[in-house]
Image (cartoon, helix red, strand yellow):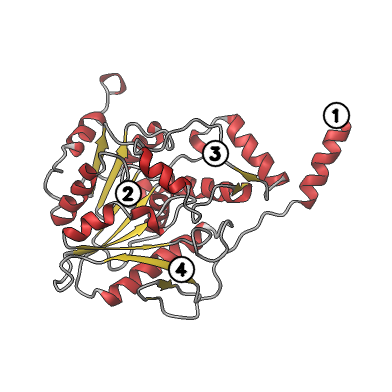
Amino acid sequence: MRLAVLSLLVLCVGCASPVLKPMGPATVSPTASDTFLTVADGAQLPLRIWQAEPATAKPRAVIIAVHGFNDYANAFYLPAPFWAKQGIVTYAYDQRGFGGAPHRGFWPGTKTLTADLRAAVTATRQRHAGTPIYVLGVSMGGAVVMATLADGPIEGIEGAILAAPAVWGRAHMNIFQRAALWLAYHTMPGLKLTGRGLKIQPSDNIKMLRKISKDRQMIRETRVDTIKGLVDLMDIAFAAAPKIGHTPLLIAYGLKDEIVPKNPSLIVMRQLDPEHATRALYDTAWHMLLRDLKAEIIWRDIVAWIEDRRQPLPSGADQQAAESLKPSLSAR
């Protein structure tokens, strides 16, 4: 019996082929219309824009928003209208492999995701010359922002906002989780998994969760090779923290987060240069902290930080982070 199982495993290893859908050669200059972001290889990524109010006035700032894993641009349907009333435009695009973007369900690779973010900034600058631009990444989107910054500054942005960035890489997985991922990737990379049975709550906003549970643009079954790609990205994001001090940052984490563990998140916060990074901890926030019931607290903090990052946040979440991140007496 053991020999039969081993033979089957060897056969699976020999026939398994992970799939990667990276970008093609750069052939065009990135542009943005009202509905699509055209990136360097000509791929068109669906784009949502929430214009600042009033429409006749020049925007105070532009936020380029990068969604999380298995989500898409509509992830910002709650905060973006609020920011619009503060005179801030929000651009959100479907990342490759997600939403309505090309190769839905397949992993594009970290280099492709970071290249597309730089393309989004280039295209947005053309439409909003002279207006301050910020990039905002939530969860996986935060990891994309961090991985991009690790390769050097993003030309044309004033700062970056990280909302519950996905930094749960292999260093913080146990040996069984790492082994299971390795085995599944090398034997069944096309196997699709769901989150059913995990008993993890991403937010306290039940109405919002019910809405997205019926949204056909959300991905509910994920290939193993895509999960492996996400873990690779999270590894890169976790390692990026000491390298991104060249860009002003606001990093926000909810202490009720059940998706990205607290320990790696706090380690990343400690590694960020406090001269360039505003660190914020929220007692009431979950993983989907921009869509929680009390999310407006964080929306307002983001506006205040964009307006003047030298001032304390209205919520006091930066002061809470400063206290929580102090070295303990036992560690000294």
The quadrant the C terminus occupies is top left
Task: Name the residue that disc number 1 marks.
Answer: 2
Q: Is residue 100 above or below residue 319?
A: below
Q: Amino acid at mark 2?
A: Leu
- Whole-angstrom CA distance, mark 2 to mark 1, is 48 Å
Describe the element under mark 3 as helix, strand or loop: loop
Q: Which numbered disc, 3 or 2, marks the residue that appears first in the sequence?
A: 2
Left or right: residue 88 compared with residue 231? left
Tags 4 and 3 touching, CB below 8 Å = no
Task: Name the residue that disc number 4 marks.
Answer: 45
- Whole-angstrom CA distance, mark 1 to mark 3, is 30 Å
Residue mark closest to the camera, 1 vs 3: 3
Q: Which numbered disc, 1 or 4, marks the residue that appears first in the sequence?
A: 1
Q: Which numbered disc, 1 or 3, marks the residue that appears first in the sequence?
A: 1
Q: Amino acid at mark 3?
A: Gly
Task: Name the residue that disc number 3 marks.
Answer: 195
Q: Residue at x 88, y 28 (%)?
A: 1
- Whole-angstrom CA distance, mark 1 to mark 4, is 48 Å
Left or right: residue 168 compared with residue 270? right
Give percent across and percent down for residue 35.
39, 72
Describe the element under mark 4 as helix, strand or loop: strand
Task: Name the residue that disc number 2 marks.
Answer: 162
